Image (cartoon, coloured by chain):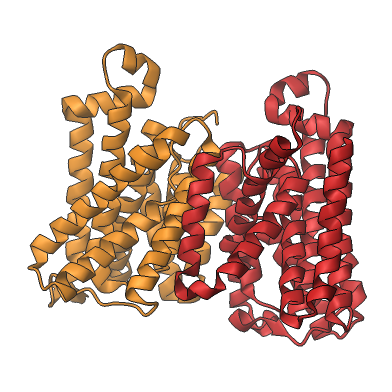
Amino acid sequence: MLTVLIYGAVTSAVLAMLAVGFTLIFGVARILNLAHGAFYAIGAYCAYSFTALLKLPLIVSALLSVAVVAVFGMAMERVLVRPLRRSSLAVLMITLTVALTVEQVLFIAFGSQSKNVPAFVNFPINVHGVSVDGQRLLALAIAVVLIGALWLFIQRTRLGSAILAVSQDPEAAQYMGIPANRIFTIVMGLSAALAGAAGVISGPFLSVRPTMDQTAMITAFSVVIVGGLGSIPGSILAACIIGYSQTIVAFYLNPEWTGTVSLVAILLTLVLRPSGLMGRVVNA
Amino acid sequence: MGKRNTIGAAVLLALFAGLPPLLHNHYLTGVFIVCAIDGIWAASWDFFSGLTGRENFGQALFIGGGAYAAAFLNGNFGLNPWFSIPAGIAVAVVFALLVGFPTLRLKGPYFALATLASAAIMQQVAINLWQYTGGSEGIYGLDTLIESSLGFYYLVLALMVATVVVLGLIARSRWGTIMRAIKGDETACQAAGINVTFYKIASLAVSAAFAGLGGVLFAHYQQAVTPDDFDVFLSISVIIMAYVGGLGTIWGAACGGILLNLMLELMRGLGEYRLWVYYVILMVVLFFMREGFVAPLWRRLRGGNA
């Protein structure tokens, strides 16, 4: 029972990191970024390259990986997405091809076998009689800290207020002298950094392979849909619901069906309450 | 129908009908068969999504539905393979109704996600219920529809032309006008007394029927089905084909399917870099040619207005 509680929390936390970034860029810039899973994969592969191939210290390679992903995300927004932003289908298609291209590059560079990212914490930790490997607990802690920090950043800082303003009305924000385009790039960077960080910290206990972005993408999608597109608290809540459902299904039924959980959740939400648990109504 | 359009279509058709027997190469005939099947899929996607503006990210649900219907009837129960065609179409239409009723009131990204999820669920089901579906291995040992590959090719080519003509005619009719009006302003259509729900669901069912037909042909061509027939990647490839062909043109979408397939085939020499180069080309096309490639190119070649 406690095992399920702890593992569920870890799964939920990683999911929340992915989903919060995804929902943030949608909420602010109305960009449905299908390359979000690719950010996650790049993060994990960077962590692998920096630690296993370049033998850099763990902390350095973790920070470097997150930075690489953030720069990649900002570059993608600036070069590829911005000129196409007026057509939502064009944005979907271009981010999709970015995701496919990244997958192929990873495949060519690293091959299709899964890679091992060294764990940051190598020893098991005993939590009330349940032994959990330290990396998972670290992932949980880092996820909570990062999401908390993002929340404070948005609610408390000047830049955060600018982001909120743009998300409510980009045009009005522009009149107030907020450079909406620059905000979009910054938010894409933040969103990518979060996804990259999720890849870095969960790399050690997941299989790092070129196709990892797909599952991540679909699960993040489902979390965001269940929580309501554009709502950060909604995605955190939904991440917990889906994270725990997946863990429960994996423990008590069959790990094979975990993938189905998130998909059924998407369909149920869309049929019963299309705007999600805490979403505002979006006019697409 | 302008005169030049007719000539263009005739030349293209003559090329596709004449090339395989001239080349007389079993492998290349196979390539052309896959091209034509992709043409059917892309045209079927474009009919619904291109005209109504609701991007369906789960066309593979209908493709896989048709393919598995063929596999169950012919592969498992040994029925005559020709039964697969009506059965596959029927299954795809049922799927379209099941998915259409709850999801078609959704807009934009929500509809895209709902369709994506339904296809992915069916894929999972096909993998997990391995007792019936053969799991990730799928079902193999299907009969082919026509023994000679050239004969099969002409069947597929004829069905592709029929698909493009039928869907094109519907698109030009009152029905097609209503679909385009729904894309423009759904509320206004409703206010004008048009039964929007009926047209949306009926259009999705028509789109599904042709996708299912393509699925049946694909299953009998491969003589096997796998859960990949439901894959997100397949849905996405179909969308890319239609996009490159030119959204809302139907014939352009079919040409897009053929063109991308031939391109992928020509790049076989690039080995493992093939897909990478392919995606980069796609990215460039998407970026610089927002209206697609085939249909706008033809408009320019032909001159005059659309």
Q: Position of residue A242 (x, y in %)?
A: 42, 57
Give the mark count.
Answer: 0
In the figure, residue B218 lies in which quadrant?
bottom right
Residue at point 61%, 43% (across, down): B111
Answer above or below: position of B49 versus A106.
above
Answer above or below: position of A139 versus B284.
below
Q: Position of residue B9 (x, y in %)?
A: 84, 49
In the figure, residue B304 lies in which quadrant?
top right
- Residue A219 showing in the rendered view: no
Residue at point 73%, 53% (across, down): B255
* Chain A drawing hue: orange
In the figure, residue A32 lies in which quadrant?
top left
Give me the chain that's red.
B
Residue at point 28%, 12% (across, down): A176
Identify which residue, B87 or A155, lies in the foreground.
B87
- Residue B38 showing in the rendered view: yes
